[in-house]
Image (cartoon, coloured by chain):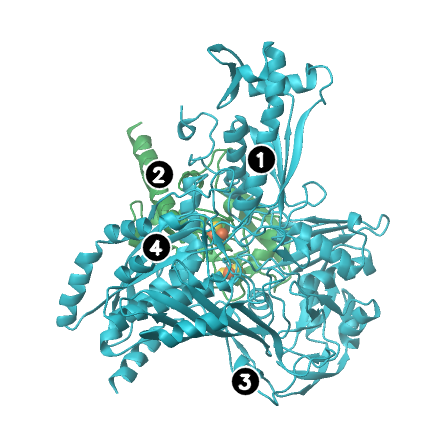
Amino acid sequence: MSTTESHVHGIGQSIKRKEDDRFIRGKGTYVDDISLPGMLHMAILRSPLAHAKLVSIDTTAAAALDGVVAVITGADLAAHNLAWMPTLSGDTQAVFVTDKVRFQGQEVAAVVAESAYVAYDALDLIEVEYDPLDVIVDPRKALEAGAPLIRDEKEDQTDNRCYHWESGDKGATDAAFAKAAVVVSLDTHYPRCHPAPLETCGIVADVNPATGKATLHLTSQAPHAHRTLFAIVAGLPEQNIQIKTPDIGGGFGNKVPIYPGYVAATAASLLIGRPVKWIESRSENLISTGFARDFHMSGDLALDNDGKMLALRVKLVSDNGAFFADAQPTKFRAGLFHIVTGSYDMPVAHIEADGAYTNKAPGGVAYRCSFRVTEASYLIERLVQNAAYELGTDPAALRFKNFIKPEQFPYKSATGFEYDSGDYPRALELALEQLGYNQLRQEQKKLREEGKLLGIGIASFTEVVGAGKSKEYDIAGLKMFDSAELRVHPTGKAILKIGVQTQGQGHETTFAQIVASELGIPSEDVVVQYGDTDNVPYGLGTYASRSTPVAGAATAVIARKLREKGRTLAAHLLEVSEEDLEWETDHFSVKGAPDKKVSIQDVAFAAYTNMPDGMEPGLEGVHYYDPPNMTYPFGSYLVAVEVDEGTGEWKVRRMVAVDDCGVRINPMIVEGQIHGGLTEGYAIAAMQLIDFDEEGNCIGGNFTDYLIPTAWETPHFETHETVTPSPHHPIGAKGVGESATVGSPAAYVNAVVDAVRHLGVTNIDMPVTSAKVWQAIQDAKT
Amino acid sequence: MDINVTVNSKPTSADVEPRRLLVHWLRDDLRLTATHVGCDTTSCGACTVLVDGTPIKSCTLLAVQANGREVTTVEGLATNGQLHPIQAAFKEEHGLQCGFCTPGMMMVTAALLEKNEDPSEEDIRWAISGNICRCTGYQNIVKSVELAAGQIKAERADATTA
Ligand code: FES
Ligand code: FES
């Protein structure tokens, strides 16, 4: 019996999700659903200005309002040494302003009151005097000499540079460019956007004055890492901090950092001795918490006359906002951007990145992306498309010519990655076939003659996900491994505890399926637990598509270890030697005598009731998995769009996605992840934008300005798959949560540009609004 | 102010502050936390409930405006512990991921299927276009609504022939 048909409902089966039973009944427990006896409510006062000296704060009237329990300012926090906190990128960030405001929406003070309504009323009574300073919102201007210094509190900081980082070989790259027949360039801004999970961030902080135990119910994608950081920031003993992450209403990277509100609510609970709830409003979420992207990129691609790629050069300036709070591995200041050579056999490459402080919100989170892989993928896929135009070749043909070939894996990239496996031509071939590419190209030609615009965009992305290995990858010093603890009970049912955190990905189902396949316990008999630091083993959390690659591997390994112990028990029960046994789906049987068998349930019972002499009782274990390498999911996305020349409006006619994420644990869930990612890719390409005016006012601070596609705009997706297992992952899985957000924006933009390039348009930066398309056409005409 | 509202078929009286939003009354006072809050500009629909059968964003209605009316939330969808066909369909078609938008989506679906027992994909996409989902890309939500529609229609047909 193959695993896919197996009654244990393991890997490869689209079983329905366990978590849904509570969600469809409205019985999920999100942080805002938690209400504790005596609980107070906190609201935060934020700065209306982007850059200003704090002259004075008067909280008298607010404190006097009926129902107000406390008003907290930066000075109060400073008195407890809590005015500043470390960021995930080794910088510091103000919890509340003490000296000056550095971005609009920055936290200035908080009110703690008996009800949320009263807390908000009291905010209006706080009087703050500001002294405005010059504002910088453009990172390139921020890096110019004489720009107003944003981080004046930092010793040795004399300008607005927050990092300089290089990757690759500059000398060899320059030499390759000198010899190149063709050089194609693209200057583009990957604009600032925001993950905007439907649930905003929040906390219920419950510090027990009698025991000193701090129970923090937190919207956290990384509960253990947050506990450690809380211990460091607040000086609380780590064993007294319990982070409980209940159901999470989407994360997408936004719930990776620690926010000032969390710290303030915890401090308030500690000082007042009652639980304190703080739930962000949508506009607070959009203006102050982890944004994404904001990379200004210049890419040059060198090719020979035949279209063979010779070298890639990228210079980029990242806008990191007022504090360098990117969530990414310590060594890599621009994340994993150096995956920018993408799916191509690129002999040499060089990347130079400079980060700038600006008067904008900090964050730089990996929004459904493995640390800046999205920006990299976008740049290379746009460049390749332009190179095809320049050479007069078909964009698909140019890709086939330059793809890393299946036999080249494991492939060492020019910037030092070791790609684990891939079959790029197969994925693109399948996508072309499904779209009917050749016919569509002909139709495009015909329509053009009739004055109608049809465009086809391709993106053949390669991602890198599943960090670590721990030697190279850490977050704020914490090595990037992950864990799984499996407890098999005497009756053969099990609990799996994992260090990663679901935010909708369906871990309760898929991780049980891994156990089912590895240990033969039906997935319905396996309860998956996570999100409680008192209960589950240490892990780094869920982001950068690392759950399946790392914690999934840990789960497979621990299940296999228990199965090996089970073999000894089975031999004891059947009175044969271990070598005489074989494992099949859910039981051990004697080789050549398949009727002599014991089920995993029998084995589990024996582990507690009838173990051989000298054997350690029980069937439980924990494994910490340190991945030997990352995984490299890939795929090809094709988009066909129709553009209205008169209005610039564009509409997706077809969207064909071929994804290869290795072995699929639950195909239904994988497909759902891809739909979600393709939608966010479309959203970024078409509308999502966090913009700022010259004074640093955030434009995009609510859902009427920050546009999110509804069911009405969102295209219909046609999804397909190829399967190239990861050779180093125990079950061959690669991770999929982010592929589509990483890969698809370039496909949409390439499609629109493809529709209008014969009119002279070479680039349109995201978000590709109708107004921009129309303008680009007008500019090209003149 | 005193109000009398039928919440999920149960007559409920309360004394509420006139400015209290319906969603806060439901969530915080009645502890019916299925209804969520996802925005502050009436944009996301996570808070959708039925007021006299019409889908309403409960973040934009005062509790006092519900006086004398009938409010239905997701907690009122299942009958006698039996899942409503819409609930079953969302699970069956993987119409939810994080679940945060789901209650609102199911309530607009309930209202749609009440008016239109055989909606086209376009009808469905239009009907749910006041509700944002950040996870699913809507495609499986559309499929869930289609499945629920078929189920309800079949049940009705059974009921009339029986
Ligand atoms: S919370 Fe009511 S529409 Fe968003
Ligand atoms: S399922 Fe997460 S917002 Fe819809």
Category of crowding for the residue at label 1, using alpha-carbon neighbours closer than 10 angstroms: few (below 14), some (14–19), many (at least 20): many
Quadrant (top left, top right, bottom left, bottom right) of the C terminus of chain A = bottom left
Pointer 2 and pointer 3 on the same chain: no
Q: Which residue is mark 1?
A: A557
Which chain is cyan in the picture? A
Secondary element at tag 1: helix
Q: Nearer the viewer, residue B76 or A695?
A: A695
Real-space Cα separation, disc 4 to disc 1, in angstroms? 31 Å
For mark 2, give the secondary structure: helix
Q: Does A156 appear above or below A209? A: below
User: Which residue bears the numbered disc 2?
Assistant: B152
Numbered label attached to residue A84: none
Subunit bearing disc 2: B
Q: Residue A673, image x and y in percent?
A: 44, 49
Q: CA distance from mark 2 to mark 4?
A: 39 Å
Circle 1 marks a residue in which chain? A
The residue pinned by badge 3 equals A141
The residue type indicated by label 1 comes to: Val
Instruction: Report which quarter residue A741 is drawn in.
Output: bottom left
Chain at tag 3: A
- Do tags 1 and 3 sit on the same chain? yes
Q: What residue did someone put label 4 on?
A: A636
As shown in the figure, which amino acid type bears the numbered disc 4?
Answer: Ser
Looking at this view, is A367 or A409 the one in front? A409
Q: Residues within 10 Å of mark 2 (few under 14, many from 20)?
A: some
- Residue at disc 4, secondary structure: strand
Q: Earlier in the sequence, mark 4 or mark 1?
A: 1
Distance CA(mark 4)–CA(mark 3): 37 Å
Disc tally is 4
Mark 2–mark 1 Cα distance, whole angstroms, equals: 46 Å
Q: Could one spot residue B8 in this view of the protein?
A: no
Q: CA distance from mark 1 to mark 3?
A: 51 Å
